[in-house]
Amino acid sequence: MNYSRLKVWCIITFSMVVIAIVIRAIWQIVVIPTPKTMLIFVPLIIALIGSDVLISYLVFKPGKIKSLSFSIGLTVTFGAGLLAGVVHFYRFIISTQADPFFSQIISWMIILSSASAYFIFLYVIWSLRKARNNGHRKL
């Protein structure tokens, strides 16, 4: 059975969401063109476009998931997303919107779990690459 139409459908569906969010992020930069806004939305745009490219790449070439370029792309994409989240977190915590006690607790829990997940991701992906490379050398 040929799944090429299903693959294209998945990519178009995901890409429409990404494009909508990127347009909204660019709109935010145009409306409020401050360095702080740029610091949040530029990494967010990079992460969104990177994730769209990586998802498209995986849909058509799932065997390439083990390549170094894919690992680097995935790391950069997650890193940009985390950077956008950290900057947004910092701006939220010092704002007046963070007055409710539970808002601050939730924000801290989200940012700490995001950072933890990123470091787990780095450890796993690069440990697997290292183990795989060591295994190839022994053969």
Image (cartoon, rainbow, N blue to C red):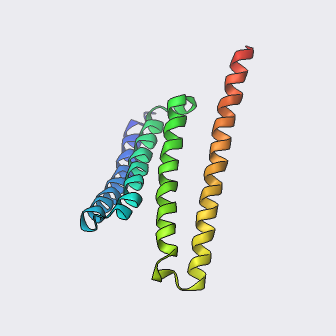
Percent across and percent down for residue 102 are 60, 82
Tell me what residue is drawn at x 71 percent, y 29 percent.
131
Percent across and percent down for residue 105 are 62, 76
Farthest residue, direction top: 139
Percent across and percent down for residue 37 are 36, 63
| Picture quadrant where residue 68 is located | top right
Work out which quarter of the rendered image holds the C terminus and state it: top right
Farthest residue, direction left: 30
Tell me what residue is drawn at x 58 percent, y 64 percent.
111
Percent across and percent down for residue 23 are 28, 58
In this image, 110 relative to 23: left or right?
right
Tell me what residue is drawn at x 52 percent, y 74 percent.
93
Callout count:
0
Tell me what residue is drawn at x 52 percent, y 55 percent.
82
Residue 100 vs 26, above or below: the answer is below
Question: Which of 87 and 59 lies nearest the eye of the viewer?
Answer: 87
Farthest residue, direction right: 138
